[in-house]
Amino acid sequence: MYRSITAVLLLSLSLWGRGMELSDLEYATLLRYEGRSGLIVGKYQKMRSFAKISPSKAEEIAKKSCMKDEEIGYIRLKRERKLLYYRLGSRDKIAKINALDGTLIECKRR
């Protein structure tokens, strides 16, 4: 009885902390382009099509949460395995915003 309750709690906590990720099919389509320099453009077009929030919305989320009065220098769409995110940089801070659901992943000083 206690084992099943603990297993359910651990599973729910691990899923809660990750946020939304790419599905297996979306992830596999991105992997086809890796390592081939001629198909880089296709990779970024696919990544943009999977992103559910726009770069301007990501900038707005970052300004509300951690970059209050700072000017954002760059916005890049990146991925780490199945996690698709926007990386926003200012002079003093770097923020990562999930491109699928708009949650703040990380905000740190340079």
Image: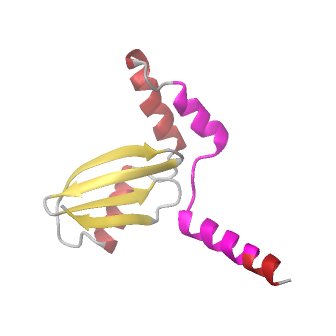
The residue most toward the bottom is 2
In x, y percent, where is residue 72? 21, 57
Q: Nearer the viewer, residue 69 or 85?
A: 85
Residue shown at the point (41%, 64%) measured from the top left: 105
Residue 64 against residue 82 in the figure, above or below: below
Residue 31 against residue 66 in the figure, above or below: above
The residue most toward the top is 38
Q: Is residue 84 left or right of residue 6?
A: left
In x, y percent, where is residue 2? 80, 84
Residue shown at the point (58%, 31%) measured from the top left: 29
Residue shown at the point (29%, 49%) measured from the top left: 75
Q: How is the image coloured?
A: secondary structure
Main secondary structure found in the magenta portion? helix
Residue shown at the point (38%, 51%) measured from the top left: 86
Q: Which quadrant of the figure contains the N terminus?
A: bottom right
Q: Is residue 62 left or right of residue 52?
A: left
Q: Nearer the viewer, residue 100 or 60?
A: 100
Q: Which quadrant of the figure contains the C terminus?
A: bottom left
What span is colored magenta in the figure? 7-32
The residue most toward the left is 91
In x, y percent, where is residue 109? 20, 66
In x, y percent, where is residue 19? 55, 63
- Is residue 84 in the magenta section? no
In the figure, residue 6 lies in which quadrant? bottom right
- Is residue 10 in the magenta section? yes
Tally of numbered discs: 0
Residue 59 against residue 75 in the figure, above or below: below
